[in-house]
Image: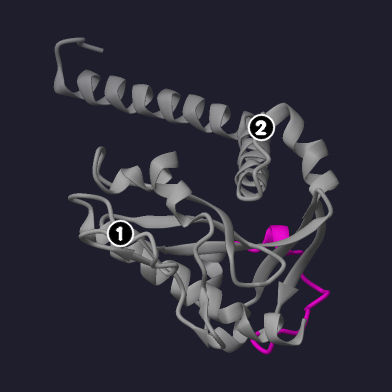
Amino acid sequence: MNRNSNAYTFLFAIILVVVVASLLAFVSESTKEKRAMNVKLEKMQSILSTIGVDVSREECGVLFKKYIKEELSLKEDGSVDTTIKAFDINLKHETKKAVNEQRFPIYVAEKDGKKFYVVPLFGAGLWDAIWGYISLADDENTVVGASFDHKGETPGLGAEINQSWFEDQFIDEQIMEGSKFVSVKVVKGGTPTSDKHGVDAISGGTITSDGVSLMIEERLQRYLAYFKNN
């Protein structure tokens, strides 16, 4: 075949595409199990971090079993669905269902003789999904810790939600005002230290900050029935 012909060029391009695609598919499949394990360990790390346990990926498997005493899948009425494992629930898919069809995972932890409740979060930022975990003390009101992450928020702006300076603001905030659920809001312009229901928003990241507020409020209200009956 004439190497200067169009036919040769097209054939060479097709062969190259097939070879590269095959190699990529092979690499993806061969690392699939390892990637899934990394996602699992990262999830454990994030859950533990909200109760003040910061560990490496190598340690988190053992320490997760040590501190997490129960993993529950809740129904809308707060009862437990024993047919579904909480850790296996994918909130990205779950939140697309009707509320009465969703299952709400919660992790009951114990540390230094104290009980904590860790609630997974999922919502929308400016450009894509945001998610995280927030833990409550045994009073089912006081925030012990929070961990957030994102897929595509703007560096230096909305992407700041996974920085400690932002996450640490949630510590000791409260989601209840008396018997009324008020959640914790991310407030533009700042909040006074006396405000137990608000934290400072990210400068220049208003939409992402609002997304965090909505995510926390929408998710936590789904657990009120469980807390009421627990």
For image coordinates 77% across by 44% down, the residue present is: 64
Q: Position of residue 36 (x, y in %)?
A: 64, 41
Of the residues under marks 1 and 2, which one precedes in the sequence? 2
Question: Which of the two residues, 177 or 7, is positioned nearer the viewer here?
Answer: 177
Name the residue carrying label 2. Answer: 34
Rendered view: 182 above or below 150: below
> Which element carries disc 1, helix, strand or loop?
helix
Say which quadrant the N terminus sits in. Answer: top left
Q: Position of residue 47 (x, y in %)?
A: 64, 50
| Residue 209 numbered mark, or none | 1
Rendered view: 77 above or below 190: below
- Say whether residue 150 is visible: no
| Residue 44 numbered mark, or none | none
Question: Which of the two residues, 22 or 87, is positioned nearer the viewer here?
Answer: 87
Instruction: Identify which amino acid the numbered label 1 is placed on.
Output: Ser
Local packing at callout 2 (Cα closer than 10 Å; few below 14, some 14-19, many 20+) is few
Q: Main secondary structure of the magenta part?
A: loop
Query: In the picture, residue 115 is in which quadrant?
Result: bottom right
Instruction: Identify which amino acid the numbered label 2 is placed on.
Output: Lys
**Looking at the image, do the residues carrying marks 1 and 2 touch, with CB atoms under 8 Å apart?**
no
For image coordinates 85% across by 45% down, the residue present is: 66
Does residue 125 show up magenta in the picture? no
Left-right relation of 107 to 159: right
Say which quadrant the C terminus sits in. Answer: bottom right
